[in-house]
Image (cartoon, grey):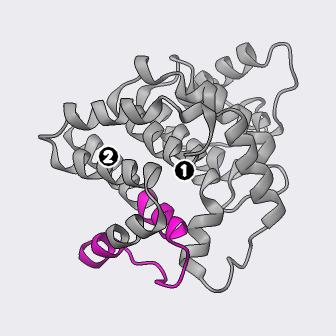
Amino acid sequence: MDELFEPEIRRIFRAVAVDRFRNRTMPPHAGLLFGPEFGPWDSDRDFLGEFYNEIHHQDTCDVSTAKGVPLLVALAVDDRVPAQERMELVMALFGIATEADRHRAEYWPGAHPQADPAAVVRARAAVEEHLAEVLTRWDVECLGVRLALAALGAVFRDSPATATLQGRVEALTDEHREKTYIAHYLRFVMLVARETDRQILPAVEELTASFWQASHREAPPQARAAHLLDQMLSQVRTTLLAWRP
């Protein structure tokens, strides 16, 4: 590949991967970061689309997705990666962790036609294994990454790694109570993280009826909540980018 046309984000990802996997086996998906046999790409976004799709192909886990999770984590916790992309990386982890629930809500009572249940279980477990490493970044992260971390923590509500997260989400909600779109999103995050299905279900019904893409009403409430939270997080990201100076 002509170095002149290599996306800058690929160079950053490669430098991070080299440093963070210096003494351990590099995930197979890191191959996309090296060598001229890949690409060409027209832009950072063009490369990133292929990169994320290699790990979580068309929003479905495969046999190697779990092996790609440590690479996503390594990039998500490194300040050389731009803040916007760190948010995207945490969102990618959220997408992997919630695949089973989101697809259950969308395809109920059936299943995603390309679903690999065993791969989904392994990949979610890989995300949970690295959860503390990602969440420990809260105090040094920007707003966008914190909003993504809040969602990721909510779907692992019973993990010891999220024990102190609820208080931080509460504080963030209070800090941004004047920004309606952030406050509404964070209140739903806290609902998912704290409440029983009986409390979650009315909120899901109310929100989806008024704005968001609906899910099957017979699907489990936690699955429907993950489906809704995914939409809300994507909208928060879009709004943040639109308001960026």
* Residue 6 at least partly seen: no
- Compute the Cα span from label 1 to label 2: 13 Å
Give the residues in magenta.
Answer: 205-229
Q: Residue at x 60, y 83 (%)?
A: 108
Magenta residue check for 221? yes
> Residue drawn 64% across and 52% down?
96
Q: Which mark is residue 144?
A: none
Residue at (57, 43) in percent of width and height? 48
Q: Quadrant of the C terminus?
A: top left
- Residue at the extreme left: 178
Circle 2 sits on which residue? 186
Quadrant of res 131: top right
> Can residue 233 be seen from the camera position used here?
yes
| Residue 88 magenta | no
Is label 1 in a helix, a strand or a loop? loop
Q: How would you rate the neighbour count of disc 2 (Cα within 10 Å): few for under 14, some for 14-19, many for 20 or more? A: many
Q: Check disc 1 and report the residue beneath it.
A: 155
Residue sitting nearer the eye, 218 or 180: 218
> Who is closer to the viewer here, 224 or 99?
224
Label 2 residue SS: helix
Residue 93, image x, y percentages: 60, 44
Residue drawn at (59%, 57%) of the image: 98
Q: Is residue 75 left or right of residue 230?
A: right
Residue 71 location in percent, x, y? 71, 32
